[in-house]
Image (cartoon, helix red, strand yellow):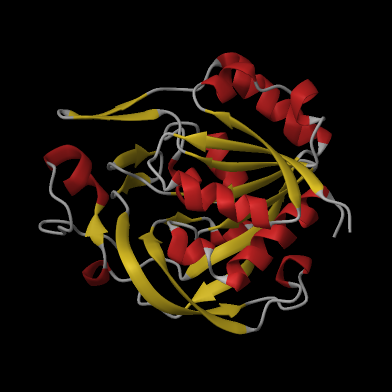
Amino acid sequence: MSKSDILLITKGHPFERGPFFSLFDQLNVNYTHIEQPLASQVMSLEIAQQYDCLVFFDMPGIEFLPGGPIVSDPPDSFRAEFQLMLEAGIGMVFLHHAIAGWPHWREYHQTIGGQFLYTQQTTETGNLMDSGYRHGVDHQITVANTAHPVAFNVPPHFSMTDELYLYEVYEHDLEPLLVSDYSFDQTQFFSAAAVVERGEMFSNDGWSHPPGSALVGWTRKQNNSRICYLQGGDNASAWDNPHYRTLLDNAIRWTSGSL
């Protein structure tokens, strides 16, 4: 089986670099690594077409400062090129915290299929509370669609230890792939805004969030592009999971159109 050529985009959120790149060294891929903010300044359809797919493990558009986060919008040039990539059918895999990038770019999150919110957001349909997080969760995952190519060679049920999110998932517009047995209730999570606005880790005081989706992986189509989001992948405990590695390898091949 030939290796997939991928463009791997990181930065914007801290991560364990050694174990993370070791993960990609073990996959059936050749990867070129680029970091934000350079990625959004130079990425184009011309560059993307040199690769089989793009893998996003970045979190651009939000900077954490003592007085609270500062949100920025993507360059107009990147917005335009991103749309061209979707129209051209460039495959994209989004991992873990990538779902929190570009907080005010609605089309970006429609492409991914959801959003993690660090702060409360007002939309045309009302107010959305900041999202929740919980580290080191031992949970059982069920494959919702065992016939999907991304699930190839993945057991129908498997365990992971990982960080989970209580976040926005656009369930009406995606194909469910992975479902967690964890309770996605506010009592089981901590407020993201408590951390970035008040410096309070592991707090949900005064925080009210409706029950969330148990989906931790899905696929969808945006324009002509295949999209896959895997919520897992916070640290080495997840990256070392052989089923996670299989899912990621399959996701890369499926979005590339070779699976």
Q: In terms of image quadrants, where is residue 220?
A: bottom right
Pick whichever, 32 or 90, lies toward us: 32
Pick whichever, 250 or 171, lies toward us: 250
Q: In terms of image quadrants, where is residue 91?
A: top right
The residue depicted at 17 percent of the width and 48 percent of the height is 194
Q: Position of residue 184 (x, y in %)?
A: 36, 71
Say if 90 sits above or below 210 in the image: above
Q: Quadrant of the N terminus?
A: bottom right
| 131 sits to left or right of 81 | left
Q: Position of residue 227 (x, y in %)?
A: 69, 50
Total marks drawn? 0
Q: Quadrant of the C terminus?
A: bottom right
Pick whichever, 214 or 59, lies toward us: 59
Kindly tell me whether residue 175 is visible in this rendering: no
| 256 sits to left or right of 74 | right
| 189 sits to left or right of 257 | left
Q: Position of residue 170 (x, y in %)?
A: 53, 56
Kindly tell me whether residue 247 is visible in this rendering: yes
The residue depicted at 50 percent of the width and 27 percent of the height is 36
Q: Position of residue 154 (x, y in %)?
A: 68, 77
Say if 86 sits above or below 251 in the image: above
| 126 sits to left or right of 215 | left
